Amino acid sequence: MMQTMKGLWLEDLRITYRTDLPIPKPRAGEALIRTRLAGICATDLEMTRGYYPFTGVPGHEFVGDVVEAPGFEGWIGQRVVGEINLICGQCEACRAGRKTHCTNRRALGIQGVDGVLAEYFTLPLANLHPVPGEITDEAAVFTEPLAAALEILQQVHIQPEMKVLVVGAGRLGLLIAQVLKLIGCDLAVVVRREAQTQLLSRWGIPAVDERTLAKGAADLVVEATGSPAGFALAREALRPAGTLVLKSTFAGDVSLNLSALVVDEIRLVGSRCGPFAPALRLLAAGLIDTQSLVSEHFTLAQGVEAFERAAKRGVLKVLVAGE
């Protein structure tokens, strides 16, 4: 008899809770992982709006326990987080070391493979990172988005004297702001709510209202709203010959004045997945405040409600416990 598990299911842009999902079987080189805690991010929400045509278990932010690892039993019992790109290892991009751009890649809970918002899921052992004991589950579940924030530093040389602006004080934007603060740059974050201002003030990061935002003053702007309006605001705040980092994925298109980008010699940088090892080091050192970013906890059985809650304005990270 086939063993089943509980989990969330995305189909036709609709999230449902199911109790009849088959427990996946790990292939060679893979681990079966029991979900301890998973996070709902903006990309998960955009999937329900048509960002990518996916049917299956959503979710890619997790901390879990390895329960099976055929041929690699030393992994069993390890508490882990994991990188979300499943690669072929054979294409030109993989051979050149650009593994996150694998031509044949699948992405956990996004493209071609079920995600983590279920009791169990599988992932290649090569994608896994053991979690140090001093990092709590509530902090470890932020490893993937924190790594995404660190990717900005991999792509752009941000000097301490630079004027840097983050547009979007949501789940990812607040992680990005904390990472950029470590550089010592002249940093500010665009806010729309008093709660965001208070949180940034606690971290010593200036908040700015978009209505009083100086135009054309920032050397570098990180757009983290996932909206056309946010992109327009970010572009307006950037000086000529500045750098605009695009950190959000969302359904739909953005209208661009390409001539203005050329005339102003704007550098556009797309940015997504990042390095896990440095993210874990920052969490272990207590340099990133994740506790303040958690809005609510839900169970898998409350998963539909969890998605509805995460979609509300002003809500930060919603966490879902594996059962």
Image (cartoon, rainbow, N blue to C red):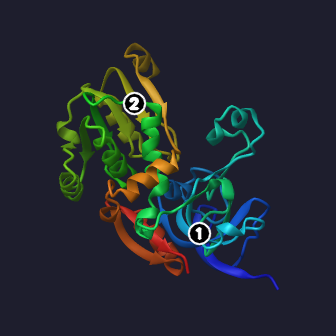
Query: Which tag, 1 or 2, sits closer to the chain's start?
Result: 1
What number is the disc on residue 78? Answer: 1
Q: Is residue 111 above or below residue 252?
A: below
At which x and y percent is residue 204?
19, 49
Q: Residue furthest front?
A: 74
- Determine the secondary structure under disc 2: strand
Q: Amino acid at mark 2?
A: Leu
Q: Amino acid at mark 1?
A: Gln
The N terminus lies in quadrant: bottom right
Q: Is residue 161 above or below residue 62?
A: above
At which x and y percent is residue 40?
48, 63
At which x and y percent is residue 92?
74, 32
In this rendering, position of residue 235 left or right of residue 66: left
- Determine the secondary structure under disc 1: loop
What number is the disc on residue 244? Answer: 2
- Viewer-closest of 231 and 296: 296
Q: Residue at x 19, y 44 (%)?
A: 206
Task: Please give the count of numbered marks on the rendered protein.
Answer: 2
At which x and y percent is residue 226?
43, 46
Mark 1 Cα-neighbour bin, 10 Å: few <14, some 14–19, many ≥20: some
- Viewer-closest of 185 and 75: 75
In this rendering, position of residue 260 left or right of residue 187: right
